[in-house]
Amino acid sequence: MAENLKGRRVAILATDGVEQVELEEPRRALDAAGATTHLIAPAEGSIQAMNHDEKGARLPVDRVLGDAHASEYDALLLPGGVANPDRLRTDQRAVQFVREFMLSDKPVAAICHGPWLLVEADAVAGRTLTSWPSLQTDIRNAGGEWVDEAVRVDDALVTSRKPDDIPAFNAALLERLAGVMSADERLEEYGEQSFPASDPPPSPTAIGGEGAARS
């Protein structure tokens, strides 16, 4: 039985070239569990999804990246597709958006090539994660430990390798999200906190997982 995620808001960060199934299947699982999901992209309109090397659907954008704030959301989904994260990691707004989620210890779920954004955000040092195999050198060079597993959970970070892993990826994401307070609940208890884009990038240790203190 799916967890009840009513009141949880999930940001999905993507752009042209996103692997369609890696966006739509996790989103469908989140929506079915009661979460509210927003597709956030650098520009308004729609983005071009891909089915491997073939064009897929055009997906409508819910919010423009420049108008979205991590403090408004409870979790972040980073789907793959080679071109999608490769474009996003050159956009400092996207990199900072990811960094803010990692600093806040909110659930972040990245699949396939999605972890490229984690590398760019200096967020893998001291963590153990998985990805599409071609990213393993980048992850290790950034101080992370790469493993060949269907899904890996490191604190609030959930990662998977490829579309075949989506069932395990979805289950881990739903479990992590069910265990956190919603944005509204956090505002009531702590007051809103944000990390301005003007802040300097944190050190890898500041964002690292359980192994960061040992690295």
Image (spheres, rainbow, N blue to C red):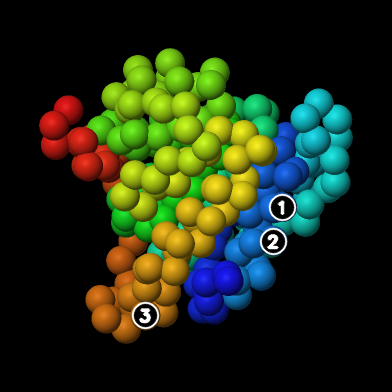
Q: Residues under labels 1 and 3: Cα distance?
A: 27 Å
Q: Residue at x 85, y 40 (%)?
A: 56
Image position of 90 with respect to 105: above or below: above
Q: Point out residue 191 in the picture as x, y percentages from the top left corner.
A: 28, 76
The residue that disc 3 covers is 185
Q: Along the line of sight, which residue is nearer the eye, 90 or 128? A: 128
Given the image, on which type of amino acid does mark 1 rest?
A: Glu
Please say if the residues under marks 2 and 1 sit with CB atoms less than 8 Å apart: yes
Of badges 2 and 3, nearer the viewer stands: 2
CA neighbours of label 1 inside 10 A, class few (<14), some (14 to 19), many (20+): some
CA neighbours of label 2 inside 10 A, class few (<14), some (14 to 19), many (20+): few
The residue that disc 1 covers is 24
Secondary structure category for the residue under label 2: helix
- In the image as oriented, which residue stretches furthest toward the bottom? 188
Q: Residue at x 72, y 34 (%)?
A: 17
Question: Horizontal placement of 205 versus 57: left or right?
Answer: left
Q: Residue at x 42, y 60 (%)?
A: 176
Q: Residue at x 55, y 48 (%)?
A: 168
Given the image, on which type of amino acid does mark 3 rest?
A: Glu
Quarter of the image with the C terminus in it: top left
Q: Along the line of sight, which residue is nearer the eye, 36 or 154? A: 154
Of badges 1 and 3, nearer the viewer stands: 1
Q: Residues under labels 2 and 3: Cα distance?
A: 24 Å
Quarter of the image with the N terminus in it: bottom right
The residue that disc 2 covers is 28
Question: Horizontal placement of 42 versus 179: left or right?
Answer: right
Q: Point out residue 9 in the picture as x, y percentages from the top left corner.
A: 53, 69
Please say if the residues under marks 1 and 3 sit with CB atoms less than 8 Å apart: no
Specify the quadrant of the image occupied by residue 142.
top left
- In the image as oriented, which residue stretches furthest toward the front? 1
Question: Horizontal placement of 116 versus 189: left or right?
Answer: right
